[in-house]
Amino acid sequence: MNDDDPLAIRIRPMTLADCDRVSEIRVLGWQFAYRELMPQSFLDALSAKDDAEQRRARFEQGDGSVVNLVASRGEEIVGWAAFGPYRDGEVRAGDVELYAIYLDPEHLGTGAGRALMQESLRQCAALGHDRVLLWVVRGNARARRFYERAGFRADGAEEPYEVEGVSVPEIRYVRELTG
């Protein structure tokens, strides 16, 4: 896209000042993506304010191992992605994990998600990682299609996840960055 285009999607590192908007996007993203996959009472109770407080604390105390990116269109932040060391339980492994990629639901299909994914993968490769892993809710067909179009494939690993007594299993996806 033309850099002079005010509506061009731009990807940049997240700042502390972005935490409120990123938390709003995360909550809206959960409420949109997990409708009918998680209890509505749980989704309705999600609080962008509470999320932002936790996000600011983690951001300020971070050791730089987690990379947070935002996508903006003009002055508006429309998406967020985060990646860092792959976690095997609480143990960090050698691979990199895409922890999150969320868009404001009003901006789905605009290319912002693809731009966040491309920049995340570019940075992961530049850091010397051979592959990226992520976890996705099994029933989230939209996200699974998005990841598959980006070159990810389910590798057969599954993890149980429960929300208010409802099983919401996750499956692991992987994408090689080399070869």
Image: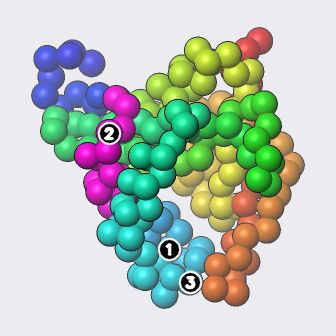
| Label whose residue precedes the other's in the sequence (2 or 1) | 2
Q: Which mark is residue 35?
A: 1
Residue 19 part of the magenta-drawn span: yes
Q: Nearer the viewer, mark 2 or mark 1?
A: 2
Type of the residue with mark 1:
Arg
Circle 3 is placed at which residue position?
39
State the separation of the CA atoms marked 2 and 1: 29 Å
Type of the residue with mark 2:
Thr
The secondary element bearing badge 2 is classed as loop
- The residue that appears at 50% across and 74% down in the rendered structure is 35
Q: Is residue 127 above or below residue 103?
A: above
The secondary element bearing badge 1 is classed as loop
Give the image quarter of residue 54: bottom left
> Few, some or many C-alpha atoms within 10 Å of disc 2 (few <14, some 14-19, many ≥20)?
some
Q: Over which residues does the magenta segment extend?
A: 12-29
Q: Which mark is residue 15?
A: 2
Quadrant (top left, top right, bottom left, bottom right) of the C terminus: top right
Residue 107 part of the magenta-drawn span: no
> Few, some or many C-alpha atoms within 10 Å of disc 1 (few <14, some 14-19, many ≥20)?
some
Give the image quarter of residue 123: top right
State the separation of the CA atoms marked 1 and 3: 8 Å
The secondary element bearing badge 3 is classed as loop
Give residue 109's position: percent from left, percent from top: 37, 44
Give the image quarter of residue 56: bottom left
Q: Nearer the viewer, mark 2 or mark 3?
A: 2
Give residue 164's position: percent from left, percent from top: 64, 85
> Few, some or many C-alpha atoms within 10 Å of disc 3 (few <14, some 14-19, many ≥20)?
some
Give residue 113's position: percent from left, percent from top: 43, 39
Type of the residue with mark 3:
Pro
